[in-house]
Image (spheres, rainbow, N blue to C red):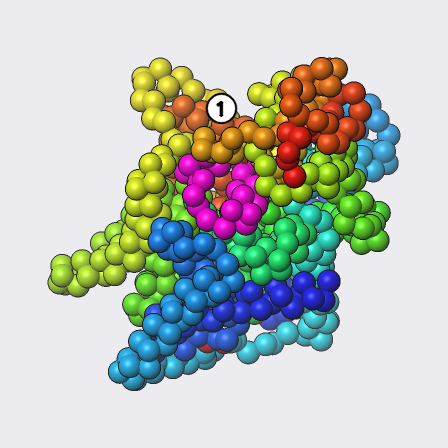
Amino acid sequence: MSLFGIKIFLALVLPFISGYLLFCYVCSGIKISTAVSLAVSYGLGMAILAHCMLFLAALGIQFNVISINLAVLIFCLFFYILIKNKPIREYTYFDDRILESNKDNSTGLFNFLKCIFLVLGLLYVSYGIFYILFRSLTLPIYAWDSIATAAFNAKVFYYERSLDNLAYVPHASFPLQIPFSLTWLAINIGQWNDQYLKIIFPLTFVSFLTVFYHFLKSYTDKKWALLGCLLLFSSDLLLEHATVSMRDLSMLYYNCLCLMFLLIWNDRKQDGYLILASLCSGFGTFLKLEGLAYLIIHTILLIFILIHKKFNVFKEAFSKLIKFVIPSFGIYSLYAGYKLLANIGVNEKWQFDFKLASFARLPTILIRFIEEVFLTSNWNIIWFILLLGIIIQLKKVRQNFTIQILLLSLALFFGLHFSVALFTKNFNDILEVFTLSRLILHFFPLAVILIILLNFPGKIQHKALAG
Amino acid sequence: MTISRQAPGKTLLLEVFYCFSIVLITSLILLLLLAQHLKLPFLEIILIFFKNLQVERSYNSCYSKLINDRHPYFYLYLIISFSSLIAILANFRFKNCKRKDKELLGSYLNRPFIIAMIVFISTISVQSIHNINNFLSKDIRFRSMSSFEKRYFLFGSVYAFAMQCRRYLPGMHVAEFDTDLKLDRDPGMTTQRRLAYFLYPIDIRVHPPHKAVDVHVFYQKDNAGAFVPEGEIIRYKLDEESLLSSRVKGN
C-alpha cells in the first residue's frame, strides 16, 4: 500500500506542478490564498495531463511514463519561461478587512452556544471528509457507468497504450479526461489496481470544498462559510459521488469553479479570474458531453454581466468576451477536432426532435423535475430552503447583482435540461431516476451559495480570496 | 427585534428559542394529526418519522422510506412553512396596520431561515446517527477484506470467473462472447459489462475489425461445451455453462 501511495503521489506531482504554473501565469498580480491556489492547480493539472495525453495520441506516440512526463514537462517549462519573462506588474494586495467584522456584543451563553455550533459543524464536515476518503480508498471501482464506460475505456488505453482503437470502445465520443487520468495512474503504479486509482475523486472533492469554502468566506465570513459547507455535506448524492468513480463530480468541480471565478471577476474586475473561469469551462468540455452546453451557458452569463456593466467602449466589452471565448472554445476544439479527424461522432447523445407534439410531455417533465428537486433524498431540504430564501429575500434579489447572476445560471441549467427532455429523443433518458439527479449534481452547489448569500445579514461584497 | 449581524447575541438567542418552540409545537401537532390519520399511536408515528428520515445512499439516487405514500421531506416542508407563517405573523396586528408594524414585519422575515436551519440541523443530526451506524456496520468490514474478497463480495462469480480466465490465458486476446442472457436488459447487460471489464485484456467488447478472434468465452450458456469451435480447447471451465476456450497453439 505504501509503495502504491508513493507511486501515486509521484504520478500526481508533475501534473500538479503544471497546473500551478498555469495558475501562476494566469493569476500573476493577484494575491490568492495558498489553499485555493493548490486546489485550483490540482484541477488545472489533471486537465493539462489529459490534454497532453490527447496530444501524444494525436501524434501517434505511445503512452508511457517517459512520454507523458516529457509532454507535461515541456508544458511546465513553457509556462515557467513565460512567467519568468513576464514583466513584473504591480501586485494588487487586497485588504481582507474591507468589511470589518462587526464587534461582537454577544453574551457568554451565546458565545458558548456559538462555539458548540462551530465544533459540531467542524465535526460533521470532518466526518464527511473521512467517510469519503475511507470509502474511495477501500472500495474498488463498482459503479455501473464507470465499469461500462470510463474505467473500461481507461483499462483499454492502459493495455494498448494508445488511442488506436478509440473508435471501437464503448461511447467513443465521450470526453476522455477521467479515462486518461485513470490510465496515467495505472501506468505509474504498473498495474490496473482500480482501488488506488480512485484517489483522483476524493482529491477532486477536497479541492472543490477548499475553493467553495474560501469563496463563501470571501463574500461572507468564516461562520457562514462553514454553514455553507454543512449544507453542502448534507447532500447524500454528492457524498456518494465523491466516493465512486464517475465523471459527474469532476463536472461539478469545473462547472462551479467557472461560475465562482466569473462572479469574482465581476466584483474584482481582474482578468486573471476571467481567464481562470474560461479555462475551467473549457476543461469541463473534456469531461462530459454536457460540458459544451455548460460552456455556452457560461458564455451567456458573461454576456449578461458585460451588458449589465454597461461598458462605455464596446471594444473593451468585446475584448473581455474574447478573453473568455478563445481559451474555452479553443480547449473544446482540441478534442472535437481530434474526433472529426478520427471519424468519431462529435456528440452521440443529443438527437433533436422538434415537434409540436413534444409539448404534451411538458407536465410530465415538470412533475419529474419538481419530484427530483424536492421529493428525493438526494439533496436533503436544500432546494426548499433556497425557495424559501428567494421568497423571503425578494428585496435582496432585486438589489444584488451577484445573486441575480446565480439565479440566472440556475435558471439556465434547469432550462437546458428541461429543453433537452422536451426537444430531444433523450426524453426517457433524462427523466430516469439516475440521470436527472446526476445532471442536477453538476450545479447543485450553486443552490448552497445562493442560500448563504441570500440569508447573510451583512453586505455581500467580495473581499479577495487571499484570506 | 431585528436579527442582523449587529444584533446582540442575546436577541438572536431569544429568536432561536422562540422559533424552536414554534417548530416543536408545529411538529407535534402535525405528527398528532398524522397519527390520527394513520390510526397509529403517537409514539409510534414519531419513531416511524425518525426512522424514515434515514437515507440509503446510492450513486444513482438516494432514497428514504415513505410515510403515508409521501416522502418524509414533504412533512418537513409543511413544518417549515407553517412554523414560518406563525413566526412571522404571531406578533403582527393586521388591524390598524401602521408603518411601524410593517417595519416590524420586515424584521421578522429572518425567522423562516432560522426555522429552516433548526429543522435542517435536527434532520442531519438524525441522519448522521444512521450514517455512522451504517458506516460502522457495513463499510468498515471492507477494511479487513483482501482485494479478491472485496471484489467477490461486490461482483460475485462474474469476478471469480474472469480472474480464472485471465489466470489460465494471460495476455491480450480478442474473444467472442456467447451467453443465454439477454444483453439488452438487466441482469444480462450488467453481467456482460462487468465481465468485459474484469476479463480485459481478454477483449469481449471492443473488437477492432483488424484483430482476429482467437478466444471464445461462454458464460451462463446452456451446454457450453457443445459450442466450442473445432480447433479450440477448453482452457478453463467453471461449470457446464461457463468456460473459456482458445486455439491449441494459443498462449
Residue located beneath label 1 in the image: A428
Which of the 4 image quadrants contains residue A27? bottom left
Looking at the image, is A110 positioned above or below residue A396? Answer: below
- Residue B41 image point, x, y percent: 86, 30
Residue at the spot 65% in from the left edge and 68% down from the top edge: A6
Q: Residues within 10 Å of mark 1 (few under 14, many from 20)?
A: few
Place of residue A424 in the rendered image (x, y in percent of width and height, measured from the top left): 38, 26
Work out whether residue B91 can be spotted: no
Of the 4 image quadrants, the one containing the N terminus of chain B is: bottom right
Helix, strand or loop status at disc 1: helix
Q: Is residue B151 above or below residue B35?
A: below
Tell me which corner region of the image, top left, top right, bottom left or bottom right, holds residue A124: bottom right
**In percent of the image, x 64 and y 23: which residue is there?**
B231
Of the 4 image quadrants, the one containing the C terminus of chain B is top right
Q: Is residue A106 left or right of residue A252?
A: right
Q: Nearer the viewer, residue B103 or A260?
A: A260
The dominant secondary structure in magenta is: helix
The residue stretch that appears in magenta: A146-174
Q: Residue at x 25, y 56 (%)?
A: A326
Q: Please name whichever residue, A447 or B146, is drawn nearer the observer in this view of the structure.
A: B146
Residue ID at (50%, 41%): A440
Q: Chain of mark 1?
A: A
| Residue B235 appears in view | yes
Name the outermost residue toward the front.
B249
